[in-house]
Amino acid sequence: MRPQFTIVNGRKVPLSQGQGVVSQTQQQNVPYAIINGKRIPVPNGQLSGQEILNQMGGSQSGRRPVIQEGLQFEQIDPYKTYTPRGKKGQSIKAQWIPERTKGSFYGPRDAFSKQIIAEQVFDVALHLFKSGISFDEENADWTVVNKYVLPPIWHDIAQTTDLQIVFPTEYPSMPPIGFYVNGGIENAPDGHLYTQAYHEAAKEPIEAGWKWFCVYIQPGSWRPSRRNWRQGD
């Protein structure tokens, strides 16, 4: 009787019914998914969400299982059928990521958050940005640095840009997620400029014609001062 599994990175990986063992040449043409950093062949071109979860092992505290395609993340549905290549033809990646740790945007803000944001915006306006700053004085949701001078590595693309920061409602407990630049800037030197907002960043500036630059702060790395923000964390 032909075995119904193959060995991948020292692990038994079930094959579809009747598929049997494939040759090395055939394996090169077999589509695969990347699960926890390992290539897993998918000979029949489909995997259920439950099969993916089984390959990933047991649940992990404080983390959730997701399918990643490019910069898009989708929580794995055990009852859904997945193909090894996503909508853009890229191999899908299944992995564990931290649970949502980002704040919300444009919600009711408490007086303490407003005070901290106003103090910090006025401080940097006074000491750093002589070209002027626009600020949402009513809700403290955003600030815009006018004609921000970009680093030299950008100068083949643009010398300056208006630069917008959107503050989470939970600021300073939660950090801003990236920042926004003029929509007329076509690209960035390192490719981190997008016409969509990822990592749960605010989408309202995108709808107003801005572009989002990805600056991601790992969970636990943002540690605001408990007493005086001027003293750092």
Image (cartoon, rainbow, N blue to C red):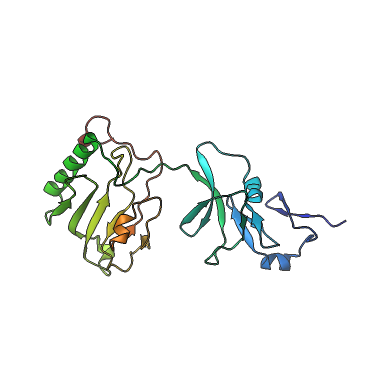
Instruction: State the quadrant of the C terminus.
Output: top left
Residues 52 and 8: in front is 52
Spot occupied by residue 94 in the image (x, y as percentages of width and height): 57, 52
Residues 4 and 152: in front is 4
Q: Quadrant of residue 2?
A: bottom right
Number of marks drawn: 0
- For image coordinates 25% across by 60% down, the residue present is 151
Spot occupied by residue 51 in the image (x, y as percentages of width and height): 66, 50
Can you name the residue that lies furthest to the top here? 227
On screen, 67 above or below 173?
A: below
Can you name the residue that lies furthest to the right here? 1
On screen, 151 above or below 60?
A: below
Say whether residue 195 is left or right of residue 117: right
Say whether residue 16 is left or right of residue 113: right
Spot occupied by residue 169 in the image (x, y as percentages of width and height): 30, 42
Instruction: State the quadrant of the N terminus.
Output: bottom right
Say whether residue 169 is left or right of residue 95: left
- For image coordinates 70% across by 49% down, the residue present is 10
